[in-house]
Image: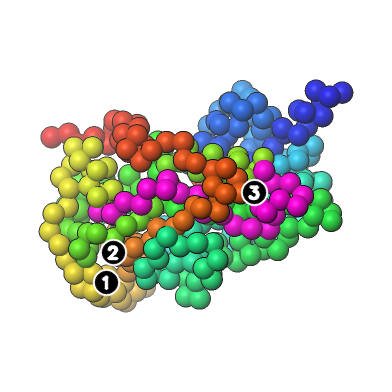
Amino acid sequence: MATRLRQANKKCTVIGGSGFLGQHMVERLVEKGYAINVFDIRKGFDHDKVQFFLGDLCRKEDLLPALQGVTLVFHCASPTPSSNNRELFYRVNYLGTKAVIEACKEAGVQKLVLTSSASVVFEGTDIKDGTEDLPYAKKPIDYYTETKILQEKEVLQANDPERNFLTVAIRPHGIFGPRDPQLVPILVQAAKSGKMKFIIGDGKNLVDFTFVENVVHGHILAAEQLQINSPLCGKAFHITNDEPIPFWEFMSRVLTGLGYEAPKYHIPYWLAYYLALLLSLVVWLLSPFVAIRPTFSPMRVALAGTYHYYSCGQAKKHMGYKPLVSLDEAVDKTVKSYPHLQWSA
Ligand SMILES: NC(=O)C1=CN([C@@H]2O[C@H](COP(=O)(O)OP(=O)(O)OC[C@H]3O[C@@H](n4cnc5c(N)ncnc54)[C@H](O)[C@@H]3O)[C@@H](O)[C@H]2O)C=CC1
Ligand SMILES: CC(C)=CCC[C@@H](C)[C@H]1CC[C@H]2C3=C(CC[C@]12C)[C@@]1(C)CCC(=O)C[C@@H]1CC3
């Protein structure tokens, strides 16, 4: 009987479990002895200890079978930020998250851990050691962030100890690591096409890049510490590597690690920003005739040329969080995991 209860307590569902973060979450949860359901629109991998449920999280009837007998749900699904599809972000991140909450309540789930994003407070201007009490961005930098704000608010408001339904949001920033389909592949693509020659601004702006295993650790700690009356209930927590690094130093380390040249010419921030604005205007004017998605966008210039690093003091205090993998080790592991992206003459 005791074993059955323990097993039920360790059964969880990872929504978005086929994605980059989701798959790393699943691997760690398996190591920790959890029984796992993955819910996703696609099957990203195979694992004999994982049960897959394919469906759209916007549909409660798709979700319910994946939540039966489950006490804990991690929600780390989202359309990819680069899709820039307003309607899709709104539907999946906002309406879909409402469906997740309803389905969790209906299925008797007790804990919901959302993967939010530190960018919910970022408006394109400097943030140094930002804490969780910064207000949500009034002018979010893109549609993705706009709907991450709506999503986070919805999840935190759903916290309801009286009905034994507890929620918490984790706000990571700049997740990287093996199998990331975004950061390293986009950078390498840019380097290959000769677009990584310029440092935007003076190159001193500090940014958080967070190794995926640390992000996973933060999520699991949050889930395990989320109890009635705990300070986690209905709150958001930054999870970072706690080692902010100049944005361009990080880019250079990844690029040189893979055998590409580091950017070396400086371009003033304002010039880069206005060039990117001009380029988006041209892209917009041409949009009836041709669809172009430029690497160089005002949003990316803002991410690359401003300070944006966050304090994870609250996670340390209330969850006992401490990054497991240092930035040096993390960059090393990441670079080694992309042998196919190494420069070759
Ligand atoms: N990658 C990063 O640097 C950061 C990511 N985040 C958040 O972390 C979470 C995970 O991100 P990644 O793993 O990088 O993204 P990803 O794109 O690798 O994974 C997202 C997963 O969600 C699934 N999904 C999308 N729409 C769905 C739907 N309608 N129904 C069911 N599944 C659906 C996708 O199939 C995919 O497997 C997201 O919520 C993202 O907003 C937050 C901060 C930074
Ligand atoms: C810090 C953070 C939130 C990182 C994750 C996002 C990254 C996937 C992109 C954010 C800024 C992007 C960017 C480029 C590549 C991809 C990012 C690092 C460029 C370096 C690509 C080449 C350029 O034209 C400049 C871009 C600046 C921003």
**Comes first in the chain, label 1 or label 3:** 3
Name the residue beneath numbered marker 1. Answer: 273
Foreground residue, 180 or 124?
A: 124
Q: Residues within 10 Å of mark 1 (few under 14, many from 20)?
A: many
Question: Could you tell me how far apart the alpha carbons at marks 1 and 3 are, in whole angstroms?
Answer: 36 Å
Please state, as top left, top right, bottom left or bottom right, where the N terminus lies in the image.
top right
SS of the residue at dot 3?
strand
Q: Is the residue 53 above or below the residue 240 in the image?
A: above
Front: mark 1 or 3: 3
Name the residue beneath numbered marker 3. Answer: 113
Q: Is the residue 320 above or below the residue 205 in the image?
A: above
Occupied quadrant, residue 126: bottom left
Label 1 beta carbon within 8 A of ligand 2? no
Where residue 89 appears, as percent x and y from the top left, is 54, 62
**Comes first in the chain, label 1 or label 2:** 1
Q: Is residue 55 left or right of residue 208?
A: right
What's the residue type where badge 2 is placed?
Gly
Marks 1 and 2 close (CB-CB < 8 Å): yes
Occupied quadrant, residue 211: top left
Question: Could you tell me how far apart the alpha carbons at marks 1 and 2 are, in whole angstroms?
Answer: 9 Å
| Magenta stretch, residue numbers | 225-248
Q: Is residue 317 left or right of residue 274?
A: right
Where residue 163 appears, as percent x and y from the top left, is 84, 54
Where residue 308 appears, as percent x and y from the top left, is 38, 61
Residue at x-position 55% and y-position 66%? 133
Residue at x-position 75% and y-position 52%? 229
Name the residue beneath numbered marker 2. Answer: 305
Label 2 beta carbon within 8 A of ligand 2? no
Q: Is the residue 237 above or below the residue 20 in the image?
A: below
Where residue 165 appears, as percent x and y from the top left, is 78, 52
SS of the residue at dot 1?
helix
Residue at x-position 13% and y-position 35%? 345
